[in-house]
Amino acid sequence: MKKLEMKKLVAMALAAGMALTMAAPAAVSASEAAEPAVKRAILDTDMGYLNDDAIVMFMLAQEDSLGNCDFLGITTVGGNSWCASGATAALRQLELIGREDIPVYLGCDVPLMGFRNLDAESKIWGMPEYAGAYWDWGTSYFCDVNERPTDYKNLPSEPKYGYAETEVQDEHAVDFIIEQVHKYPGEVTIFVIGAGTNMALAVRKDPTIVEDAAGVIYMGGAVDIPGNSSSAAEFNWYYDPEGIRICLESPWKSQIDVPNDVAEAVFYTKDIYDRLVENQGNAISNLIVEGQKQRFEDNPEASSYVWDAITAAIWMHPEIATDVQERYLTVDTTYGPNYGRSTSWWTSRNRDVEAGTGMPYGVQKVDVVFDIDREAFWNYYVDILTMDVQ
């Protein structure tokens, strides 16, 4: 997409989003929404190497190979990585697992309101615990966003696995999302596991995708707990609060959110790594085992969260989610210490989630996942990542 077209698109999104609400009835909950005849997925991601985003990509690729879903493509967005470096990571890892057929599209890493001045913000509201692509990695300073990479074939440093021979698609991520949703009405679920910028622009460019999509599944927000970037906000929704608010306040047929409340209560440990080693049987598990070997050799007690991976697991197997609460959910876009904070409403004396009464205008119902069956999740995790589907 030409720069002028993108500037017009961003301007349109901001102008249309001043109130950040859509004059439409509330969407039904995920539990009430009909299961699509064919499950199709678009992965909107701030991709890295062997990180939680990559695990979702591997899971969806495996399910696609098994015929359980149609993995339409990957769109890159800002967050953990810039769009260019995220595209490089996606393309190369797809090559390494033999899935070059899955297309990758470059999206937007500039938040709707422009880049944050985190150096100034940190002096007023305190240093963020995590700032993703904003960090000048290896230092305690923020990078110069004007020098961020924009060419996925020419990054500032050599990529972890080198450059891919496969190229990104010519079409912009926003247009790809719109095109696919209309091509397969009622069947496409968009995984928004980075910032919400691409999806917000897609909604503002063509609001009819909201009624044609099967739904959206997010990894983001800290609903009933403190944030992991600022004290108030979880990083994905901290990166572009206006973007994610446009997404959340659109009346999709289904919205499911996997917030930090559950994502940071599920730990990947050496026990799970050892199971991958024992069942190692494909290019994906070979890549993971080799990539994580040194870490667990150096520190057998090491652990990490799996964040995004939960989204793919519960999409394929909803029964893995054991505590799902219907909330009316949005994000605070007031510029201040609570910028990007998740805000939710539940049934109480004067509010009724089921009836939609007593709720703020424009805010939509979201199925928020607060807990999962860990045994079932880890069984799925190991099985899908080690399965030989060739």
Image: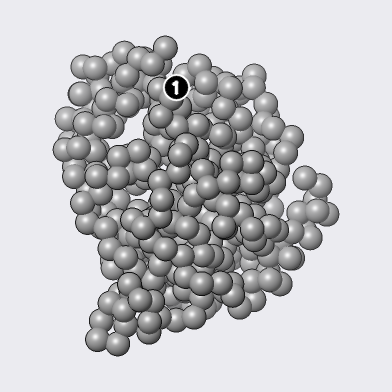
The reply to whether residue 266 is in sight is no
Image quadrant of residue 127? bottom left
Residue 379 picture location, percent across and down: 21, 31
Residue 355 located left or right of residue 61: left
Give the farthest residue toward the bottom: 350
Amino acid carrying label 1: it is Ser
Residue 153 picture location, percent across and down: 68, 29
Asked if residue 79 is positioned above or below residue 152 in the image, the reply reads: below
- As helix, strand or loop, the secondary structure at mark 1 comes to helix
Residue at image mark 1: 65
Residue sitting at 45 percent across and 32 percent down? 69
Residue sitting at 19 percent across and 45 percent down? 373
Asked if residue 220 is positioned above or below residue 49 in the image, the reply reads: below
Image quadrant of residue 338? bottom left
Asked if residue 58 is positioned above or below residue 182 in the image, the reply reads: above
Residue 347 located left or right of residue 110: left
Asked if residue 57 is positioned above or below residue 243 in the image, the reply reads: above
Residue sitting at 50 percent across and 25 percent down? 93
Crowding near the residue tagged with mark 1, few <14, some 14–19, many ≥20 C-alpha atoms within 10 Å: some
Residue 177 located left or right of residue 295: right
* Image quadrant where one finds the C terminus: top left
* Image quadrant where one finds the N terminus: top right
Q: Please count the marks in the image.
A: 1
The reply to whether residue 90 is in sight is yes
